[in-house]
Image: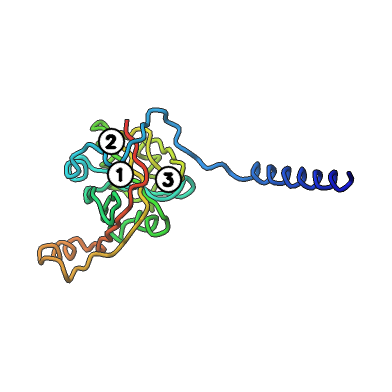
Amino acid sequence: MKLKQLTLGIFAALLLASCGNKANEPEAKTQTSDQWQEIKPQEIDVNAVKMFADDWMLLSAGKDTSMNMMTIAWGGLGELWGKPVVTIYVSTDRYTYKFLEENEYFTVTAFPEQYRDKLQYLGSVSGRDEDKLKGSGLTAEFTKLGNPIYKEANLAIECKKLYAEPLNKELMPLEQRQWYDEKKQGVHVMYIGEIVNVWKK
């Protein structure tokens, strides 16, 4: 009887300790908008060339305590190694490059035309100099994995980095090499991310 009571007492103590530890753990921020509908990558019904080149996308990396975002027009959707992927290109000069290197995930989000001026702003200023999120007026939300998307967006794609490699200037056509020389810009790094989640409105 005493042995049984002792066993129950130890079990109860361990259970309370476990609950106490969980209570002290910070809760991960998750998205708050109820307008998002989760879809499969194969259900992304867009013209990828138009979405990147004409409409632009917002690339984000980091967590709620430390993140950055930038407008991009270089990118694509496709398949690699049997996985649905997003490919993006970011110059080593960009502040977002640091966040891409330090984090396992990134997101790309699309917006209705009415937010064109926000994307213009986010592509023309640096997060080194100012709080871009505050300046844009956009509302950051966070996925279950802790990655930023935006309440105002109408498409959000969450990606896990699969591969990254700097573009080789020596292998570029002359016109592109001259472009880098004229811009005096750091070479772009190609990031390929496996699409792990997609939401639309």
Identify the amino acid type marked 1. Answer: Leu
Residue ranking furthest to the bottom = 170
Whole-percent x and y of residue 145?
A: 45, 45
Looking at the image, tell me whether mark 3 or mark 1 is earlier in sequence order: 1
Circle 1 packing at 10 Å, graded few (<14), some (14-19), many (20+), is many
Q: Is residue 186 left or right of residue 151?
A: left
Circle 3 packing at 10 Å, graded few (<14), some (14-19), many (20+), is many
Contact between marks 2 and 3 (CB within 8 A): the answer is no
Element on which disc 2 rests: loop
Q: Quadrant of the C terminus?
A: top left
Identify the amino acid type marked 3. Answer: Asn
Residue depicted at 88% across the width and 44% down the height = 1
Contact between marks 1 and 2 (CB within 8 A): the answer is yes
Residue that label 3 marks: 147
Spatial separation of the CA atoms under disc 3 and disc 1: 13 Å
Residue ranking furthest to the front = 1
Whole-percent x and y of residue 64?
A: 47, 45
Please say if 50 is above or below 127.
above
Residue depicted at 49% across the width and 47% down the height = 65
Please say if 46 is above or below 91.
above
Spatial separation of the CA atoms under disc 2 and disc 3: 17 Å
Whole-percent x and y of residue 77?
A: 24, 48
Looking at the image, tell me whether mark 2 or mark 3 is earlier in sequence order: 2
Looking at the image, tell me whether mark 1 or mark 2 is earlier in sequence order: 1
Residue that label 1 marks: 58
Residue ranking furthest to the right = 2
Element on which disc 3 rests: loop
Residue that label 2 marks: 111
